[in-house]
Image (cartoon, helix red, strand yellow):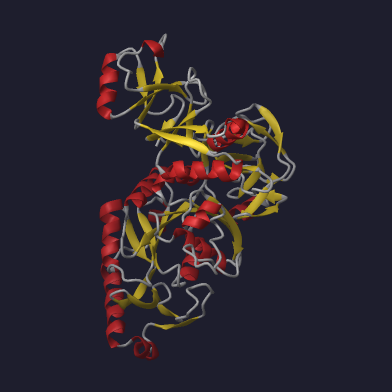
Amino acid sequence: MSTLVPEISKRRTFAIISHPDAGKTTLTEKLLLYGGAIRLAGSVKARKAQKHAVSDWMEIEKQRGISVTSSVLQFDYDGYRVNILDTPGHQDFSEDTYRTLMAADSAVMLIDVAKGVEDQTKKLFQVCKQRGIPVFTFVNKLDRYGRNPFELMEELEKVLGIRAYPMNWPIGIDGNYKGIYIRKQAKIELFERSGEHGQWALPSTQGSVDDPAFKELLGEEIHQALCDDIALLDVAGEKFDFDKVTSGELTPMFFGSAMTNFGVRLFLEDFLEMAPPPVPRMSSEGFVTPDNDKFSAFVFKIQANMNPAHRDRLAFMRICSGKFERGMTVYHVQSKKPIKLAQPQQFLAQERTIIDEAYPGDIIGLFDPGIFGIGDTLCQEGSAFTFQDFPVFPPEQFARIQAKDTMKRKQFVKGMTQLTQEGAVQVFHQPDYPVESFVVGVVGSLQFEVLEYRLKHEYGVDILMNKLPYSIARWLIGENLDVKAMKNMDSGLLVQDIKNRPVALISNEWQLRWVVERNPEVEFLVVPEDAQQV
């Protein structure tokens, strides 16, 4: 116990959330750069000579410059152990992002200075709000033309219902920014212009806002605009209140540019100081506190083939309490069996390190022979509680998928099974359908592309994919339920999920109302009975 508390206080575990293309993966790279984890940061939309982003490990991510899976990245900085959960921004992969937020203690909300609060940001912010996660805001892309900072603050309050306290303020007029003003130190920091596209950690010049040398350097107009803005913030702006930050009423706001290194180091240092250490987690037996000396953890992500050479499969585990030690035996609640945790790993994207110990807040990877599922609880032998259930997304698009080559049936079934266990797609089957095929449900169409790509490149299977005309799935329950006797299902499809529960696929809301009316003895559920809907 004596070693637990100081170790817990060092941990900062957070997710980065944003709309696609706000610069999330680029910011992650720069945090790693300042943390000393990488020497050279790769541009996400990279030129051929450049590196790809460290957090984008999957080949399709490197080709398209997007993140389609959550990455787990760890490094030490200034006495802190930092666990970054870099999530997909694209709405088609919301499910992976929502699950990742279950493992985070705080969130960094990234906003494009020109576009402000966008649709996906709103959805993810609401999840953070529901879960009581403190949100820190980084306004990105100050190297481009952007909106007035006061406008962005007003938008945060109107659209998201959260007030902002700017920790720093951009120096410049009409998007031509030269640096930032650091409010708590009454200093300005100017960044050198460089032809390196923000790849290196750039040196900066610091000085007081009243320094005549800075007035001369900035010019009369820019210097006066800065002084006016700061005076207005000090008089009429929100007062900083840490309790309001932790309760989700106030967001500390930082301005910068991940691509050119405006304000990234300052943000990292202030964020680590303010962000909460690991917090208690709700379980079936009440809150589990991090300083409880009994070990507990939950699985929030499963990833197959992170190392294509070894065809491995990893379960990502968030430690909630107690000390983890390599080789320890724990109780796997779902299988009701003891398990020895022999090869725990920590990550810098694909680079892995075998570790001997870890503490609450840490994310570690476990070799998974197929026993773990998303949301599984691991705890010390003698305990048997479960952590809060993971929410489920109802699928909205469907396709029938089968292998082109029947000789590849074994690889096809293995690939579909593993990718389903990852939570990448939802898979259904028709018991009486003659061909070896699956009906796949997804939230967004990009998931179909990734599924096809991964089956081909990771399992060597080309597939035939036929889109199906359904947009709604409903799980069916009822006393003495006979799905074959259901009325008005001619234009729908009756299937079973991986637990053999009956599911009706229906084309639209009008058709759904018609089917529900004609089958009053059947209950139509948006998600399975034992699941919570997002």
- Among all residues in the image, which is located at the extreme top? 480
Which of the 4 image quarters holds residue 170? bottom left
Residue depicted at x 45% and y 41%: 448
Which of the 4 image quarters holds residue 78? bottom right
Up-down relation of residue 415 to residue 101 (above or below) = above
- Asked whether, in this view, residue 159 is left or right of residue 484, the answer is left
Up-down relation of residue 325 to residue 242 (above or below) = above
Up-down relation of residue 213 to residue 447 (above or below) = below
Residue 510 % position (x, y): 24, 26
Residue 322 % position (x, y): 64, 44
Q: Which of 409 and 67 is in front in this view?
A: 409
Q: Which of 307 and 399 is in front in this view?
A: 399
Residue depicted at x 35% and y 46%: 123
Residue 47 % position (x, y): 50, 67
- Asked whether, in this view, residue 58 is left or right of residue 465, the answer is right
Q: Do we see residue 277 in this rendering?
A: no
Count how many numbered circles sit on residues in the image: 0
Residue depicted at x 30% and y 82%: 222
Residue 44 % position (x, y): 48, 62
Split into 4 quadrants, where in the image is the C terminus? top left
Q: Do we see residue 512 in this rendering?
A: yes
